[in-house]
Image: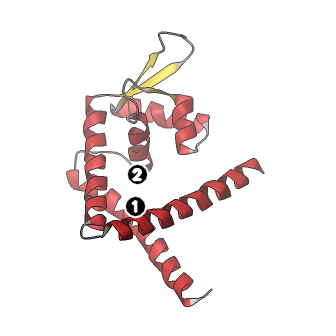
Amino acid sequence: MNQFEKELNEVLVDTFGLIIKAEELAIKKTGRINLSISEMHLVEAVGKQKGGRTVSAIAEDLGVTLPSVTIAINRLCKKGYVEKSKSGDDGRVVIVSLTRSGHKIDLVHKFFHRQMLNNLSCGMTPEEKSVLLKGITRLNRFFREKTAGMEAK
């Protein structure tokens, strides 16, 4: 590993840990939110589509098994952040949507991400933004391919 790779690896690992820690602290700071980071990301996944989403769509989006998402959704229902209903088209299909509390939590989480992105991009030239986006996109592609290959085995 050359010097650039060593430094980049340290920054990426540290940044990932700090993002998770900052999200956890932001959740705890409100004092009223009784969610883990995983649950927060599940709320975010449910809120991606107005009118709700199916459990399988949420599982696929998060790359998590259907039974795991079902259990987590049931916990979020008990906590009052999501609600389940039958699809009007097919009664066997369950639609999960955010409650009023779930919408509020999702907005708090989105605000955190907006702050993070505004802070990162503030003062960057269009070229710097383009290079950063290209690098992160390449990293994202690597992890998508890596995880897809591991899941196939």
Frontmost residue, 122 versus 41? 122
Dot 1: within a 10 Å radius of its alpha carbon, few (fewer than 14), some, or many (20 or more) residues? few
| 103 over 88 or under it: above or below | below
Q: Residue at x 54, y 32 (%)?
A: 57
Frontmost residue, 128 versus 151? 128
Total numbered labels: 2
| 131 over 8 or under it: above or below | above
| 26 over 58 or under it: above or below | below
Residue 25, horizontal then vertical, whole percent? 29, 60
- Specify the amino acid type for callout 1: Ile
Residue at mark 1: 20
Q: Residue at x 70, y 49 (%)?
A: 151
Task: Classify residue 66 by image quadrant.
Answer: top right
Q: Is residue 134 left or right of residue 114?
A: right
Q: Earlier in the sequence, mark 1 or mark 2?
A: 1
Label 1–label 2 contact, CB within 8 A: yes
Dot 2: within a 10 Å radius of its alpha carbon, few (fewer than 14), some, or many (20 or more) residues? few
Residue 47, horizontal then vertical, whole percent? 37, 35
Secondary structure type for disc 2: helix
Name the quarter where the N terminus is drawn: bottom right
Residue at mark 2: 37
Q: Residue at x 33, y 57 (%)?
A: 23
Residue 137, horizontal then vertical, whole percent? 51, 60
**Mark linked to residue 143:** none
Q: Residue furthest bottom?
A: 3
- Specify the amino acid type for callout 2: Ile
Q: Is residue 120 left or right of residue 93?
A: left
Secondary structure type for disc 1: helix
Q: Is residue 133 left or right of residue 126?
A: right
